[in-house]
Structure formats: C-alpha cells, structure tokens
Amino acid sequence: MSNIRSAFNGGKAFIPFITCGDPDLETTAACVRAAVKNGADLIELGIPFSDPTAEGPVIQGANIRALNGGVTTDKIFDFVREIRKDVKIPMVFMTYSNVVFSYGADKFISTCKEIGIDGLILPDLPFEEKEEFIPQCHKYGVDLISLIAPTSNDRIAMIAKEAEGFLYIVSSLGVTGTRSKITTDLKSIVDVVRKSTDVPCAVGFGISTPEQAKKTSDISDGAIVGSAIIKIIEKYGKDAPEHVGKYVKEMKESIK
Amino acid sequence: MTNPKGRFGVHGGQYIPETLMNAVIELEKAYNYYKNDPEFNRELTELLNEYAGRPSRLYYAEKMTKDLGGAKIYLKREDLNHTGAHKINNVLGQALLAKKMGKTRLIAETGAGQHGVATATAAALLGMECVVFMGEEDTVRQALNVYRMRLLGSKVIPVKSGTGTLKDAVSEAFREWTSRIDDTHYCLGSVMGPHPFPTIVRDFQAVISKEIKEQTLEKEGRLPDAVIACVGGGSNAIGSFYHFTNDKDVQLIGCEAAGKGIDTFETAATISTGRLGIFHGMKSYFCQDKYGQIAPVYSISAGLDYPGIGPEHAYLHDTGRAKYVPVTDEEAVCAFEYLSKTEGIIPAIESAHAVAYAMKMAPEMDKDKIIVITISGRGDKDCAAIARYRGEYIYE
C-alpha cells in the first residue's frame, strides 16, 4: 500500500495544489510548509508546462509566471529534495505527459521515488494511454493517479478497478478554475467508485469555499483546491505563505 | 495504416483529458458507421461536387515548366475550391458527420483563417452554430478572414494565451470542448490531435490524391514522379500523398516552414528541429526545449506556424516513405511572387512553400519527369502581409 493512503487515514483529506516556482521556489517552499502546518493532508505540486490544456486562466497564469521565473524540472527536483527533509505528508506531482516523456520516463519516475514524491497526476493521460508510464511507476513504486470526469459514465468502474493512490474526481466539465456552483451528480459517481475499489477518492476542479469543500468531501474522501490557492499566491506574491496557511486552516476546519 | 488505437508506428494515440474520452469514442463509432453508409457518402459527394466545386483541376503549368527547364509541372488546384482552400474537403465531411451525430454547434481552431472560414461556411450551409478560436496575432495577420467568418455568421474568439498563434487556438478549442460536449463537435482542421481525428481528416482529404492519380493517368498515362505539398499539421500533404503511399516510385515531399532558417529560433520546421513528444492529444514530433516545454515557433505563414506535425507524417518520415524539407520565409515569398507572375496564379503563402521547393527540384530533373505541386489555397488573404514583408504598406 502506498504512502498516499495515510493522507486519508485521519478523516476527510484536504489537498492543496501549488504550482512550483510561482513566483519563485522559496515562496513555494514557504507555502507548502504553511499548508502542512495548517492541516493539509497531501500536497499536489504542479510542474509548470508551457501549454497546460486542462487549466483555466488562473493556473495558466501560474504556469507562465513560474516558467518566466526560470523554473525547470531539475530545479523542482532539487526543491522537493530540500523540503522533504521536514515535510512528512504525502506529495504528488501534477504535470503534463510531455514533461515526463521528454525527461525520460524512467529517469523522471525513479527521481520521483528518490526525492520522496508518492504519485503522479497527468491530466492528459487517460486510461487508454497509461501504459506509457505504468511500467516505470510500478517499477519504482510511484502511484499513477487516475481521473474520473462527469462524462466518464460507463468508464467509471473500469478506471476505478485499476486505481492506485487515490482517485481524482473532476467535479465539473471544462478546465480548472473556481465555480460558483457544482452541478454534477457526484454522489452517483462515488457510489460506482465505492463498488469497484477501496482506493480513496477526492474531488477537485471548481472548489474554493468552505461550503463547497464540505459538500464535496461529505460524499467523498477529500477535497482538492487549486485555483483558489493560486489566486492568493498571485495576489500576495512573496507574502503569500501566511495567507495560504490561513486559507488552508479554514478549509480544513470546514471538512473535519 | 492505422491500428485500432490510432497509432501510426509509435505516433498518434489519445493523450487527452478523461472528460473528452467518451466524446472521441462516440466520434470514432459514428465515423466508422457513417463512412460505410451509402446515404452519407452520397450526400458528402454531392456537397463536394455541387457546392465545393470538386473535382479540382490538375493544371499543366507550361510557362513555369519551360522557364525552369526540367520536369513537367502540374498544379493541383485546391485553391479553386469554394472558400479558396483544401480545408473545405475535411470540413464538409466533419460537419455532415456532426450533424448526423445530432450535434448543433461546431467549434474550430484556425491559423491562417482558411479552416475557420471553411468551418463557418459549412455551419452556415448546414444551419449550425459556429465558434472559431484564432490566435490574437493571427487575427491581425489575417484580418480579412476574421471578417469573412463573422460575415458567415460565426463568432471569432481571439486567443491571447501563450504565443497567440495556431497552437494556442488549438489549446483553447480543446478547453472549450471539455466544457461543452453534448451539443458541440470540435471540427479539427488538420491531421493531428487525438485519434480518431488524424484518420478522419486524412480520409476526407484523401480525395486530393485520388483525383491527382486519376488525372495524371488520364493526361500522361502514368503516375507522377513526385508529389510536393506544404506541411503544417499536414492535412493537404497527407491528402496529396495518401493514394500514392503504396506506389513506391512516386516521391512524396512535404515542405515545412523554416521561417528565418532552421539554424535560428524563428522556425516552425518540426521534422528538421523537433523531437518526439506528447502534445495536443498525440505522440509525434514537436519543437520543444530540453524539458519538454513547447517552443514558440515562427513562420511568415500563419497556417504553418505550428510546433508539431500530424502523427502519420511522423511515421512516413520514420519509414522514409516521405521526405520532409525546410523552406524559408524568403524562399516562399519569392515563390509566391514567381507563380503569380509566371502563371497568373496567386498561391497561399502556405502553398508557396511547396512551389519554392519544386522550383529548386524541377531544373535538376529530366524533361520526361512529372512533378505535381498541391496548391492548397489561394493567396488573396496574404497580399497585405507579403506587401509588408517587402516594405510596402497597403490597406486591405
């Protein structure tokens, strides 16, 4: 069983997403530590990509700021190595297939293991293409996390049966970004998941308020928040860690 | 040549968000059904012939042939199609398919604007709603086509993200599709993206090589020695090559946009400067940096200004069946001017890349050899930009 499971052992999990290097890696490190201190259960670290096709404008902006700041995959590996000394909760990378492929899947995934990354989320790698990286993930013991979408329908059970780490349930159609309302019937998706696997599932895309986090984690095992945190980082820049900490605390409280 | 998972050798595949998986599966099922449906084929053939003006002419460029003094040159006149480019072949097929699938709305990306205009045209004809995504920089380079799309009843959305060119328009169209799938078909304009698009678009464009074959047999009693076409994503090229892939004596040559040269960063020549990667739903060759970040490419031609190439071209390159050569802005502009003055045909700046390579190749060949150049589109849209390139500022 992977380390990721431990994030879900103490009740509902709160999972913040942070783009590495936005605006710089020192700020990212401080944001991660603030999130951990204030109750985050698992950290999703974004490796920026030039053309993030699954992201809305907010996370696109973070990707551009990070890349313009000169962050690279190697610098991010070094950064994780450093924060791993004191950050004990599970951490996963969220990036795009080409970032892994271009680095060399074997080299990328073995490095993940070496520096203490527990899983990999690749929004442009559906079930049909996971053979691209599954052999290396299994070889080194890094979970390849699958996503389920509101349009998955007859695919939910198939995906859930082979799930590892946790299942990322996409709350809404479209790209990442905050939404005033989530209308997908998440409960019926989770019901199918529960029948197919005991791997935990967390809901992401569109969640920004404590009420939304409570509502989605009530029916699943946790809530993932990206754009709302990126907005805080965008607004406060180097002063963001304190504000990120405060936000994580409030969100974690709401789902306890 | 496609295996069930949409692979061309190692290339192709379906690297897309889960949200879109059922949409592409539904599209594949519908396509596999309708491509064998006599009624669908009858309707499509009628649209292609009566509306788009097919078959397009295979014109013997006598003056050009004599001037270059080598191989006999024929021009496959896709520029004479309705809307002025080969794009209409694919769009009529996809729009009709989408309509059969019960979709009421088309979205599309466009670079030079030709695919956007073709999609807007098909939407007007078939009574569908249409939204076209176009890089902001391209809306300036191709202002006339923006107006044409609006005139045809489409909405044009300038894309500001990234480099504001074709790749960003593709990304934005994919983003839009993930947010609205039920009533919307993404009418992809080239032989790229996730399976089944590279196969569907190829099949709809294959009419070009089918006609070239029939027409050269009729006019010359034999097949051509070389078929030359420009390549961005590669739809007119794959259409021009497809029915010749088993005729090993026919050389297939794709002309990539080298921009200011393949030894500069201002280039869009994927085969010459790119490497294997995964982007926009497919595995293929892409211009990218050492960490896999997609490179900001450049070409004078908005339609070839794309950092990747369709997976079937990547495969034809791997196997050596087709050859891909870089052509610079300067060479393309010279060819644009040459064909205009010599034959009275103003080619699209995209197509001028193919003309430029033929101008180098023909004089080296014997007079009994035959070259076919696909003129993928007409060049009216480019006149203002080429005038600017030559330092002349005109109002459109």
Image (cartoon, coloured by chain):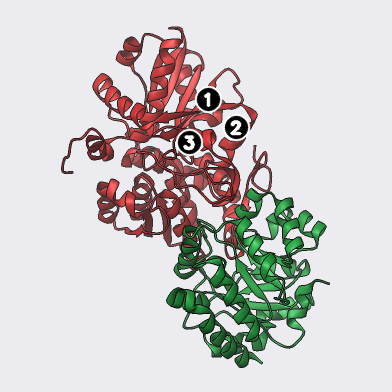
Chain colours: A green, B red
Provide the residue designation for mark 3.
B269
Q: Are marks 3 and 1 on the same chain?
A: yes
Residue A52 rendering spot, x and y as whole percentages: 52, 60
Marks 3 and 1, how far apart at CA: 17 Å
Provide the residue designation for mark 2.
B316
Q: Secondary structure at mark 3?
A: loop
Q: Are marks 3 and 2 on the same chain?
A: yes
Mark 1 nearby-residue class (10 Å; few <14, some 14–19, many ≥20):
many
Marks 3 and 2, how far apart at CA: 16 Å
Q: Quadrant of the N terminus of chain B?
A: top right
In the rendered structure, which disc, 3 or 1, sits on the residue that comes first in sequence?
Answer: 1
Q: For residue B50, what is the image quadrant? A: top left
Provide the residue designation for mark 1.
B252
Q: Chain of mark 1?
A: B
Residue B200, compared with residue B380, is above or below; it is below
Residue A198 rendering spot, x and y as whole percentages: 79, 77
Say which amino acid is labelled 3.
Answer: Ala
Mark 1–mark 2 CB contact (< 8 Å): yes
Mark 3–mark 2 CB contact (< 8 Å): no
Marks 1 and 2, how far apart at CA: 9 Å
